[in-house]
């Protein structure tokens, strides 16, 4: 019975709520990609110039580097050829000022075309709650910059996937639409949990 299997041996020595939240945090942390970190740091340095310095390697260094929002503001401004979306980036020790600059970056990134599902929340960066989400947003931004090819992207085009290439390249629009419908149906029904329901998601069926 599900209720009985909760206190596992590993968690017996700490309160379950702490154990659970730590497990959740470890899951989130495991999605943080050190290789992607190197690419993102390299790109941001090229995009913004040497003035932004370099972070200490690792997640905490990455967070500390971006936490006040200044580098993020410079990054997003560097991708806009005309009027810059973030009017003023200024280093400040004040928490609300730093958070404000992060949210200015997020608004500008959305204006640039990053989808809501790819956006991190201000606390993900500021409190270090989910730095994998921060990586996801920055990757999406890099992909857009490469795809738009407006002459503002400064880096190796192979660092990020072009947006159109995320799907298999030889699918026609109709096939892609058919695939989306199938997945939509699966999500809307309880059959998705069974093997039978899962088989709809296999590419062989879509093609």
Image (tube, grey):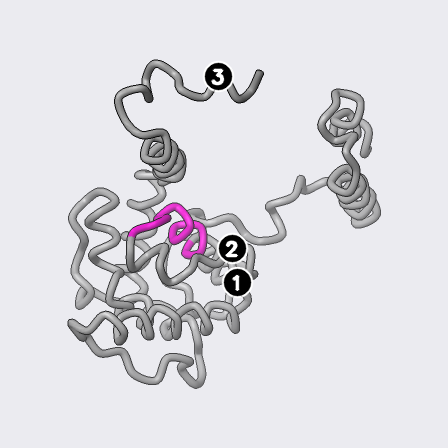
Tell me where residue 139 appears, x and y as whole percent.
44, 52
In screen coordinates, is 62 left or right of 186? left
Which residue lies under the disc numbered 3? 5
In screen coordinates, is 173 left or right of 108? right
Q: Residue at x 36, y 40 (%)?
A: 32
Residue nearest the observer in this picture, 81 or 71: 71
Residue 50 is covered by the magenta coloring: no
Rate crowding at label 1 as few (under 14), some (14 to 19) or many (20 or more) other CA atoms within 10 Å: many
Q: Earlier in the sequence, mark 3 or mark 1?
A: 3
Rate crowding at label 3 as few (under 14), some (14 to 19) or many (20 or more) other CA atoms within 10 Å: few
- The reply to whether dot 1 and dot 2 touch (C-beta < 8 Å) is yes
Residue extending farthest to the front is: 4
Tell me where residue 9 appears, x and y as whole percent.
34, 14
**Residue at mark 3 to residue at mark 1: CA–CA distance:** 42 Å
Which residue lies under the disc numbered 2? 118
Region in magenta: 128-138
Which residue lies under the disc numbered 1? 114
Does dot 1 land on a helix, a strand or a loop? loop
* Quadrant assignment, res 92: bottom left
Q: Earlier in the sequence, mark 3 or mark 2?
A: 3
Does dot 2 land on a helix, a strand or a loop? helix
Rate crowding at label 2 as few (under 14), some (14 to 19) or many (20 or more) other CA atoms within 10 Å: some
- The reply to whether dot 3 and dot 2 touch (C-beta < 8 Å) is no
Q: Residue at x 31, y 69 (%)?
A: 99
Residue nearest the observer in this picture, 16 or 120: 16
């Amino acid at each position: 019975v599900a209720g009985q299997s909760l206190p596992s041996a590993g968690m017996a020595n700490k309160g379950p709520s702490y154990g659970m939240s730590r497990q959740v945090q470890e899951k989130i942390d495991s999605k943080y990609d050190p290789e992607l970190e190197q690419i993102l740091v390299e790109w941001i340095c090229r995009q913004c110039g040497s003035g932004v310095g370099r972070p200490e390697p690792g997640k905490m260094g990455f967070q500390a580097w971006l936490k006040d929002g200044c580098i993020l503001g410079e990054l997003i401004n560097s991708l806009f050829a005309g009027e810059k979306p973030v009017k003023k980036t200024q280093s400040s020790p004040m928490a609300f000022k730093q958070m404000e600059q992060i949210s200015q970056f997020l608004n500008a990134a959305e204006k640039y075309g990053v989808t809501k599902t790819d956006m991190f929340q201000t606390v993900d960066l500021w409190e270090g709650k989910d730095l994998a989400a921060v990586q996801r947003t920055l990757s999406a931004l890099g992909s857009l910059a490469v795809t738009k090819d407006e002459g503002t992207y400064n880096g190796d085009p192979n660092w990020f996937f072009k947006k159109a290439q995320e799907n298999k390249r030889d699918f026609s629009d109709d096939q892609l639409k058919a695939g989306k419908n199938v997945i939509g149906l699966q999500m809307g029904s309880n059959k998705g949990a069974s093997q039978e329901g899962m088989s709809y998601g296999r590419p062989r069926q879509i093609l």
